[in-house]
Each structure stands twice: as C-alpha cells, then as structure tokens.
Amino acid sequence: MIKRFLILSGIAFGILLVGSSLFASIFTPQEYAARRARMMKKIPDGVAIFLGAKSRVDYNEYYQNNDFMYFTGVEVPDAILIIDGIHEESILFYTLSERGARNHGISLDYVQKPSEVTGIDKIYPKDNFSGYLEGLAEGSCVFYTSFNPEELMRECTREKLRTLQRNMVNDEWDGRPTREQQFVKLVQDRFSQVEVRDCSQMIWDLRIIKSPAEIEVLRKAAKIAVKAHNAVIKTTRPGMYEYELAALYEYMVKKEGAQDLAYYMIICSGENHPYLHYYEHDRLLADGDFLVIDVGPDLGYYDIDITVSYPVNGKFSPRQKEVYEACNAVHEACMQVYRPGLTREQCRLEVQEILEKQGHDLSKDSFQRMRGSFGHYVGMAVHDVGGGPSELKPGMVFANEPLCVFPDENLGVRVEDTILITEDGCENLTAGIPRTVKEIEAHMKKRGIVQILKRAKIY
Ligand code: GLY
Ligand code: MN
Ligand code: MN
C-alpha cells in the first residue's frame, strides 16, 4: 500500500508527509481539503456521499477506491465520506480499533488522532452514519453520489461498468445491481423525499486536472517505470519466455516502491500482435520476433502508461524499421504540437504537416494503418476519468500512443508515453526510454540483468 511508497520516497517527498508519521496519506491534509472544497462549490444545494472500499474477503492487500482516496487519502476499510456543499464541511465515518489498525498496517494516528492526520474535524463511528443521513434528509437537500462503479486496483470505472452490466446486472442468471446502483436504491427507498443525483462527471472534472503535488507523484512513478522498461529491453534475448520479462519488470518497479502494476502487463509478439491487450506471457521469443510491451507501475495510487516496441534480437529488419519509424515519427510530431487549446482535429492536421515537411510518404501502409495517439487520460486509473481529452488544458495527463499492426506479418508497433500538458506545451513524463532505432539497437547491445547474472554464474 502507500506505506511502501512513503518509506522509499520519504526524504524526497518530505514536504508531502503529514506531521511525523511516515504512514499517513500521500498528500498534505491541505491538499485533500482543497479538493473537497472544490467539490463543495459544485454542490451548493446538497451533499455528496462517498462509500469507501470494503474490507477484503480474500488475501489480497486492501486498496481504497480512487474517488475516496482522492478526497481523503484515508485507507481505512469500510469508511464513508460526506462532503456537504451546503454547510461547507466534510464528515468522515469509520470504526477502527488499535488492533484492527495494527493488523492492516494502518497508522495508529487514524485511531488516536484522526482529525489531525486527516484534516477532517468531524469524524464519527460508522454506526452514526444512518442517523446523520436521516438528519440531512430532513433538510431540503440533494444527495449526490457516484453512479459509476468504484475504481479499485487495476480497474477503470467505465470499463468496469460495461463488464458488470454484461456479466452481472443484465445476466439473466445473476441480475444483481452494482454496489452503487444498490446504494442509490436503498437511499431512495428510505428517503423518498430526497433527490439522488449522479456526481461522477463532477469528480472526473476535478480529477482530470492534476495538481502540482499529483504531478510530482506522477513524475516519480514515471522515473521508476522508465528504469524498469529500460532494464527489460536490455535483457531481452531470443530464447527467453515472455514471462521472464514480466517477472523482471514487476521486480524492478516493486523494488522502487510501487504498490502494484497499474494494469496487467501486456506483451504481444508473434501471432498475438492483433490482440492489443494480450497478457498470457506465454510465448518463447525467437530470433526475428518483434515485441510490444505495454506496462506501468501504480505508485501511491498514481499510474503510468508506457509501451515499448523492439526486435527481440536487438536488430531491426528493414520492414520492422519502416513501420517502427513511422510510428515513432507520429509520436514525436504529436509531442511537438501538444499544447493548451489544441483539439484532436488541429492535432491531426498539424502532425500531418510536420510529417510532410520531414519528407515522409504518408501514402505508405505504415501511415495509412496508424491509429491511436492523443489517447486516454492517465491518473489514478490507467484509463482515467472515463475518457480522453477533446481539447488540451494545462494539468491534463494522457497517453500519446500511436500504433500500427500488420497481423499477416506478425508485426505490431506501439510507441506510448505519458504526457503532461503544461502552461505552454507539454512534458513527456516518461522521457528517457531509447526511442529511435539507433538508440534501441545501441541499448540492446549492452548486457542486461539476466546476462550479468549468468556471466557471474549466479543464475
Ligand atoms: N495500457 C493500456 C493502454 O494503453 O490502453
Ligand atoms: Mn498502454
Ligand atoms: Mn494507453
């Protein structure tokens, strides 16, 4: 959980830590208070209710849902938050014993001095929630809550909703509502006079624009990601299994304090290139294969999205080079034009102009088959806040991800970085990966971790 991230980055991020505790939230109480204050401004006629993630029923570690984390930084299971836009205050409900806290690795501050550590004055036992809600329902106020499914580790709310609708809500042999649908129904049944409204878009509008503190965490996550990608590229050789590369990546990012991967590692090679999210890790890599690796860490609830594409033997064939360079040219041209105010259509036209000026033949199949770039938002989820930008604004973070696939040739290329829009342009958060053919080939001539261990007869 967050703890690992804080221990490892405690010195660099000292100003972000709360008081003397290493085990508190990632951000200061003031940062969370500012987020809640922005939410209050959006709901002057009501209160927003946020259900925290429930205690786990398995042996996986606890992960708070992203909205709850965004507004509180509190990782206590089964908590509830009310953001009251009428009285401009926040109320937190949870019940936590010292033993429960120790058991879950939660700081005792959440038991002994909860207001100090959270910055929320009104913190009550969970059992008080129903009575509190009854009191609010007696006033004439709107209840806001997110109708979309909570985002847990490796989840993206829109995709989760689509899947739950298919395999649960609308499955004739299941039919259960989502947790959120059930909550809305319970509230409406109990308080028929209250109007319940969806506030997902309001939360997304806040989460889309990253604060300076969030950007610092993303930069740190990006550094870890780049280092791990470079280690994996360097160690790749024909005769290795994809799962060996997956294991190394996971080791590299966790060693640096990542709590998990942001999403299950995607590795496409051979006949799997058309399946853009293929993740079986089951191919034995052969001389001549081309590889796409799409993966990033989750560090302190912030995700990174990177894809690298390269030949397993470290030397591009003429065709691999042609398709790769087309993709990389689009990637670079996009980064030249990304700036506040840019729309998708403007981006397409300006990128085209740059490529033509550079002398590229855009009628070639590598350009004709290209898609992607100007992709989805990235943040607390890898496909963050329900979509992607139509017009760029400072503080937005999204994936630049042009891709091109030729299934008949067992060839797929994707060049992906996580990009921040700044006041006057963009910053490639994940810069530092060898991206040109020359850089990749030079990088792959070096010995990677596996080769070093083998040479030393350790492995
Ligand atoms: N990492 C998944 C994607 O790029 O969509
Ligand atoms: Mn990706
Ligand atoms: Mn992506």
Image (cartoon, helix red, strand yellow):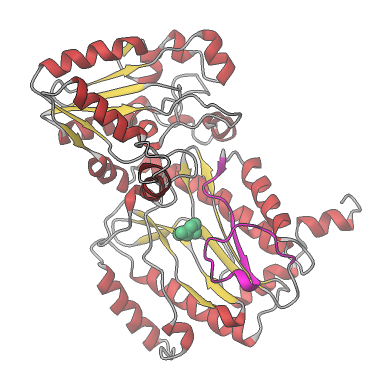
The residue depicted at 17 percent of the width and 13 percent of the height is 135
Q: Residue 236, image x and y in percent?
A: 72, 64
Of residues 354 and 364, the one drawn nearer to the viewer in this rendering: 364
Relative horizontal placement of residue 163, taking residue 299 as reference (left or right): left
Whether 277 is among the magenta residues is yes
Q: Main secondary structure of the magenta part?
A: loop
The quadrant of the rendering that contains the N terminus is top right
User: In this rendering, does residue 48 appear at all?
Assistant: yes
The residue depicted at 31 percent of the width and 31 percent of the height is 182
| Stretch in magenta | 260-284
Whether 156 is among the magenta residues is no
User: In this rendering, does residue 33 appear at all?
Assistant: no
From this viewpoint, which residue is outermost toward the left?
140
Relative horizontal placement of residue 125, taking residue 88 as reference (left or right): right
The residue depicted at 79 percent of the width and 67 percent of the height is 239
Of residues 285 and 88, the one drawn nearer to the viewer in this rendering: 285
Q: Answer above or below: position of 175 versus 422.
A: above
Q: Residue 372, image x and y in percent?
A: 41, 69
Q: Answer above or below: position of 342 versus 325.
A: above
Q: Answer above or below: position of 411 versus 306.
A: below
Q: Residue 327, image x and y in percent?
A: 48, 76
Rendered-image quarter of ligand 3? bottom left
The residue depicted at 88 percent of the width and 58 percent of the height is 455
Q: Quadrant of residue 387?
A: bottom left
Q: Residue 115, image x and y in percent?
A: 36, 14
Q: Answer above or below: position of 371 versus 140.
A: below
From this viewpoint, which residue is outermost toward the front?
173
Q: How many marks?
A: 0
Of residues 192 and 443, the one drawn nearer to the viewer in this rendering: 192
